[in-house]
């Protein structure tokens, strides 16, 4: 009998190259979920949260929520438009959007490097862009970047 976790129908499922890699990835995902570790420090918030890790017929998987759209399939020019979808953002605001996305990616890659992890699987499908709801005194939603998986070799299935 196959025992699969209860996942949302649009979950992003990533296969791992083997059990030993899967176990190491799972350990890192647990560290990210816990906020990081004492040696390296806090994990950045630019990692998508892990829903489940599971094995199915000898293949090992990690599942993540379907956060935003894949970088490879988004029209990047729409990121720099006002909420009306037509007017361009003022240059300082557009620059802030660009810098926030670059920093999200660099924070995640830097943290992976501190962990001694490669990011060979980092691709346009594993880099996701989403609009984050306003927090605190913010008046508008803003674009953020999230990595699905560690980018350490797995592929989105």
Image (cartoon, grey):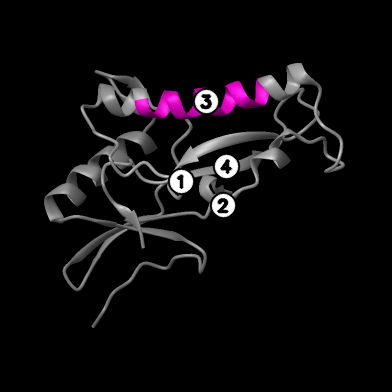
Residue toward you, 65 or 85? 85
What segment carries the magenta color? 96-109
Residue toward you, 12 or 71? 71
> Which of the numbered marks, if any, corresponds to residue 124?
1
The residue tagged 4 is 129
Depth check, mark 3 against mark 2: the one in front is: 2
Q: Work out whether mark 3 precedes mark 2 in sequence or the reverse, and give the earlier one.
A: 2
The residue tagged 2 is 73
The quadrant of the rendering that contains the C terminus is: bottom left
CA separation in Å, label 1 and label 4? 10 Å
Q: For the residue labelled by badge 1, is the local secondary structure a helix, a strand or a loop?
A: loop
- How crowded pointer 1 is (Cα within 10 Å; few <14, some 14-19, many 20+) is rated as some
Residue beneath the point at 49% across and 39% down? 146
Magenta stretch encompasses residue 56: no
Depth check, mark 2 against mark 4: the one in front is: 2
CA separation in Å, label 1 and label 3? 14 Å
Q: Locate residue 111: give its quadrant.
A: top left
Q: Work out whether mark 1 precedes mark 2 in sequence or the reverse, and give the earlier one.
A: 2
Q: Work out whether mark 1 precedes mark 3 in sequence or the reverse, and give the earlier one.
A: 3
CA separation in Å, label 1 and label 2? 8 Å
- Name the residue at the bottom extreme: 1
- Name the residue at the left extreme: 20
Image location (x, y in percent) of residue 41: 33, 19
The residue tagged 3 is 102
Residue beneath the point at 27% across and 38% down? 28
């Amino acid at each position: 009998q196959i025992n699969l976790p209860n996942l949302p129908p649009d979950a992003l499922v990533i296969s791992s190259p083997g059990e030993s890699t899967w176990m190491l990835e799972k350990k890192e995902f647990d560290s990210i979920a816990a906020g990081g570790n004492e040696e390296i420090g806090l994990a950045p918030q630019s990692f998508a949260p892990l829903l489940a890790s599971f094995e199915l017929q000898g293949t090992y998987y990690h599942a993540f929520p379907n956060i935003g759209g894949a970088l490879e399939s988004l029209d990047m020019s729409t990121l720099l438009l006002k909420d009306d979808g037509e007017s361009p953002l003022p240059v300082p605001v557009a620059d802030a959007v660009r810098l926030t996305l670059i920093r999200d990616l660099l924070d995640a890659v830097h943290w992976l490097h501190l962990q001694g992890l490669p990011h060979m699987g980092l691709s346009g499908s594993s880099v996701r862009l989403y609009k984050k709801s306003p927090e605190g005194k913010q008046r508008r939603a803003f674009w953020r970047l999230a990595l699905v998986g560690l980018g350490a070799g797995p592929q989105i299935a």
